[in-house]
Image: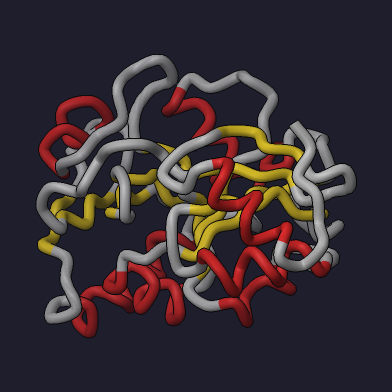
Amino acid sequence: MATVHPFSLTTLPVLAASVGSVIQGGGLIAIPTETYYGLGASPFDAGAVDRLLSVKNREDGKPILVLIGEVGQLPLLAADMPRVGQILAEAFWPGALTMLLPAHPSLPSNLTAGSGLVGVRLSSCVPLTELLKQTGPVTGTSANRSGSPPATTGEEVQQELGREIDLILDAGRTPGGLPSTVVDIRQPIRFVREGTITRQTIRNVLETHGIELST
């Protein structure tokens, strides 16, 4: 079964090195976010991504979400940050907005699903972002098997995935609710999934900059 560690800003200094070692070694960890628990692996390691896809039983051909600890980590993942992405990042990061960005060419194809895109989010979960400032980006797809409800507690992750992942960072119950909103920021800008941040809220921000959101 996965090792479970209580996770907070208080425990972070003790955990950071061991978490980084697991990630760099191709391991899988469960991490809390501002919505649900996510399944973290190195986005730069094709083998770790393959293992993640196998654990989730995911074959939907969609790019895998990656979580960053700070905007300065974006060049590791994205080949470009269009102006609309900068606008949305300033308005909604940290927070529950995932942007589909042009993927850095060095990223493994199983992370981008051959789309040339990578989904990136800067979470508002402070212990997580502080951790990722030290470990670097990790994947953040939901910590559940495809088709199962997303997990809001470490116990739920342990029950479903504990035999197949290495570490659970248990921060108690996450807020749950709607998932992150997903926007494809290529032209024309496309709303992929409405979540915590509504379509109208994003449209209002873009319109103040003279940018139209397509349907």
Camera sees residue 109: no
Q: Nearer the viewer, residue 91 or 143?
A: 91
Residue 128 sits above or below residue 133 on the image = above
Q: Nearer the viewer, residue 207 or 13?
A: 207
Q: Residue 28, percent across and down?
A: 39, 47
Q: Is residue 188 left or right of residue 17?
A: right
> How many badges with numbers are in the image?
0
Q: Is residue 57 left or right of residue 59?
A: left
Camera sees residue 100: yes
Q: Residue 71, percent across and down?
A: 60, 77
Q: Residue 94, percent across and down?
A: 45, 68
**Residue drawn at x 71%, y 59% as measured from the top left:** 206
**Residue drawn at x 63%, y 20% as measured from the top left:** 60
**Residue drawn at x 33%, y 78% as measured from the top left:** 17
Residue 86 sits above or below residue 4 on the image = below
Q: Residue 52, percent across and down?
A: 49, 36
Quadrant of the snapshot with the N terminus: top left
Which quarter of the figure has residue 125?
bottom left
Quadrant of the snapshot with the C terminus: top right
Residue 59 sits above or below residue 120 on the image = above
Residue 166 sits above or below residue 106 on the image = above
Describe the colour scheme in one phrase: secondary structure
Q: Is residue 11 left or right of residue 76?
A: left
Which quarter of the figure has residue 154?
top left
**Residue drawn at x 44%, y 53% as measured from the top left:** 96
Q: Nearer the viewer, residue 89 or 113?
A: 89
